[in-house]
Amino acid sequence: MQQRVPREERRRRIIESAATLFSRRGFRGTTTREVAQAVGVSEATVFKHFATKEDLYTAIIEVKAQTRQVLDAVSPLAEARDDAALLRALAREMILRTQVDPTLMRLLFFSALEGHALADLFFQRRVQALDDFLAKYIADRVAAGAFRAVDPILAAWNFIGMITQYLLLQELFRQKAPPHTSVEQAIEEMVATFLRGVQP
C-alpha cells in the first residue's frame, strides 16, 4: 500500500516540479497536466492546491525569490556601513544561491520574454527589491560623503549588473570561468572595481 503524502509535502513537490518545467519551457510552454505527470499526481490534485496556473506561478515566485533571506544576510553590514563587506556579501548571496538553484534566473528571463502579467510580480519581488535596497544604501553613503555624487539607482544597477553578467555566462551560456579564478576572486574584483568607481 502506497504511503499517503502529507498535504504540505505534496504542495512543495508540485512547486518544485512546476518550477523546473517552467524554467525549461516557459510558462506558456508548460501545461498543468505536465506538472501533474512530473509529480505523479492527477491534474485535479494540482488544482486542489492551486486554483489556476497563475496561482502556481505566484507560489513559485514566493518560494524561489528568497529576497528576504538575501536582505537579512546583508542588512547588518549595511547598518555597520562596511561598504566592501556589504557588496561582497550581496554578490556572494546572489551567486551561491543561483548556483545551488539556477531555476530562478531562468524563470526570470522566461517571464520577461513571454511578457505575461506575472513578470511584473517577479520583477518586484526579486529584482526591484534588491535594486531599491542597494540604491538606498548608496544614496546614504553619498549623503555621508563616503561616495562621490553618483546616481544611486544607476550605481546599484551597475554593481548588480556585474553579478548578473557573471551568472548569465555560467548558468545560461555554460561558459566556465578561467581556470585560475574562483568565485571569491570574481567577487573581490567586482567589489574593488565598483568601489574604485564610486569613492571620492
Image (spheres, rainbow, N blue to C red):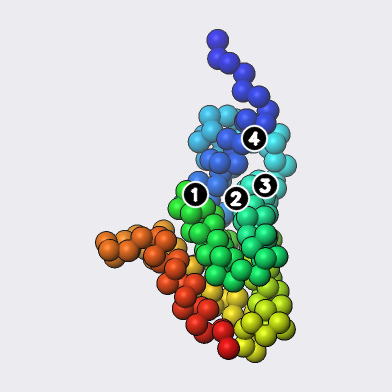
| 4 vs 2, front mark | 2
What whole-number distance in Å separates the C-alpha atoms at marks 1 and 3?
16 Å
Q: Amino acid at mark 1?
A: Asp
Name the residue at 53% across, 40% down: 17
* Residue count near mark 1 (Cα–Cα under 10 Å), binned few <14, some 14–19, many ≥20: few
Q: Which residue is mark 1?
A: 101
Looking at the image, tell me whether mark 4 or mark 2 is earlier in sequence order.
4
Q: Amino acid at mark 4?
A: Arg
Question: Is mark 1 in CB contact (under 8 Å) with mark 2?
Answer: yes
Question: Residue 147 or 126: which is nearer the viewer?
Answer: 147
Name the residue at 56% across, 65% down: 85
Looking at the image, tell me whether mark 2 or mark 3 is earlier in sequence order.
3
| 4 vs 1, front mark | 1
| 1 vs 3, front mark | 1
What whole-number distance in Å separates the C-alpha atoms at marks 4 and 2?
14 Å
Relative to 29, is 181 on the left or the right? left
* Residue count near mark 3 (Cα–Cα under 10 Å), binned few <14, some 14–19, many ≥20: some
Q: Which residue is mark 2?
A: 64
Q: Amino acid at mark 3?
A: Ala
* Residue count near mark 4 (Cα–Cα under 10 Å), binned few <14, some 14–19, many ≥20: some
Q: Which residue is mark 4?
A: 11
Question: Is mark 4 in CB contact (under 8 Å) with mark 3?
Answer: yes
Name the residue at 46% across, 72% down: 190
Q: How many marks?
A: 4
Q: Which residue is mark 3?
A: 59
Q: Amino acid at mark 2?
A: Lys
Looking at the image, tell me whether mark 4 or mark 3 is earlier in sequence order.
4
Instruction: State whether residue 101 is above or below residue 179.
Output: above
| 2 vs 3, front mark | 2
What whole-number distance in Å separates the C-alpha atoms at marks 4 and 3?
10 Å
